[in-house]
Image: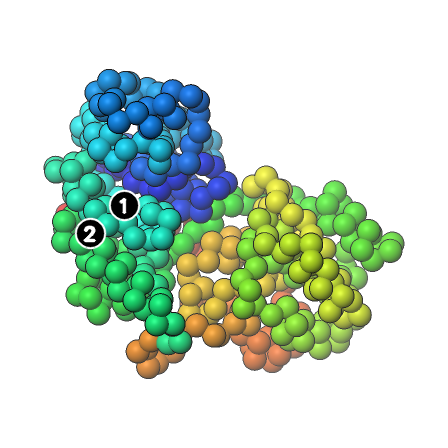
Amino acid sequence: MKIAFIVRNLEPGRDGVGDYTRRLAGELIRQGHGVRIISLNDKVENGKQKAEIGNDDRISAFSFHLSAFLEIQNSDGTDVECLRLPRTMRWPQRVELARQWLDEFNSDWLSLQFVPFGFHPKGLCFGLGKRLAAINSKAQWHIMFHELWLGLAEHSTVKHRLWGALQRCIVRDLIRRLRPRVVHTHAEPYRIVLDREGIKAVILPLFSNISVVSGNAWTDLIAPLLAEREAGSGERNQFYLAGVFGAVHPEWDAEVAVVTLLPLVRRFQKRLVLVFFGKSNLYPERLGRLKSQLENRAGVVMAGERPANEISLIMRTMDLGLATSPRQMIQKSASVAAMLEHGLPVLVIRDDWHLRGLDSPLGNISSRLLTPEQFAALDILPTRDPQWTAENGVKQVAGQMLGAISQY
């Protein structure tokens, strides 16, 4: 089977959907399928030629070579062919180049990995459906909705509801023009919303973008950071390490997390330490306030941005993961997916986002996700399970996707 994925951006480590798609593509290739990826709104800056082409209205799509935009990217040891079309290029040129490449590939399926803000800075990507339909008229369409539209929550502002109404029109236009045979999404609230629109969608779980590696980061990374913070540090078993991976949502309250954890941590005579790692938005002033706020109850260390293998080692060093996303949207958190795949139990303290019109709560998403009430009821401190096998790893998810599209 030949599958071509369409995304916004393919800069490694700078776009979660692009990283997700590259890893999925690599797994599908290993399973014997032909796969390519096109980024239609890329931030790539690979030379003067591309910038000049994008800004010259007189140049047609036929007056330069596809080779200028081709790139081989690697995912878990597998090469993936990519066509990266810069956002500086006019849309007719991008559409024509994509069409040429796909005609040569002769794909069976086109898979749109949709994020509204990926194709327009305000998420108002009007005309996207028409442009995509012009790329290929033969292949069948698959759409993965990574996000839908604004204004879905119970307490959404009027501004977001109006904004979201425009984005909803764009989604409906996509469905009308592309007529996808298979529609997936990660989160149950999104599946419910799509069903309300008459769009039958199925959950395709989110897998981790971070491959699991052997070893841990205690000796080389975490212990030295603790020594700076804790004035001498100590042995590994003296600490209970709770990790926060990636961006910290402003609604997440570290105070609530610490109050939840401390009674059980102290019962086992350990020192609680919060470890922030990955691309965090904890700027120095906010981090300083957090350290001061928690000083006598928990240590705070910043491991910062790291290569993917070091991120994996850090997660293998943690005892617990802390989710900063709300429970109803936890299925779309790549950070949580990574922590779960590394065997970490994950504490979810936020329950402040609720889908408008959803009368009943969502069911249990994973046995490894803990509410504050569940954590408080434990008799032992939960820790990482080194024998844990991912429930929804990339192999399993690739198999689910293939199973869905192979029915047509």
Q: Is residue 248 left or right of residue 125?
A: right
Q: In this view, does 45 lie to the left or right of 65?
A: right
Q: Is mark 2 on a helix, strand or loop?
A: helix
Which of discs 2 and 1 lies nearer the camera? The answer is 2
Q: What residue does disc 2 label? A: 174
Image vertical order of residue 349 relative to residue 79, above or below:
below
Residue 254, percent from left and from top: 64, 68
Q: Residue at x 18, y 28 (%)?
A: 103
Q: Are marks 2 and 1 in contact (CB under 8 Å)?
A: yes
Q: Which residue is drawn at 35% across and 36% down?
A: 87
Image vertical order of residue 81 relative to residue 336, above or below:
above
| Mark 2 surroundings within 10 Å by alpha-carbon count, few (fewer than 14), some (14 through 19), many (20 or more) | many
**In this figure, which colouring scheme has been used for the structure?**
rainbow
The residue nearer to you, when weighing 397 against 81, is: 81
Residue 341, percent from left and from top: 50, 53
From where the camera sits, is residue 362 visible? no
Q: As shown in the figure, which amino acid type bears the numbered disc 1?
A: Leu
Q: In which quarter of the image is residue 75?
A: top left
Q: Residue at x 59, y 61 (%)?
A: 321
Q: Which mark is residue 112?
A: 1
Residue 172, percent from left and from top: 19, 58
Q: As shown in the figure, which amino acid type bears the numbered disc 2?
A: Leu
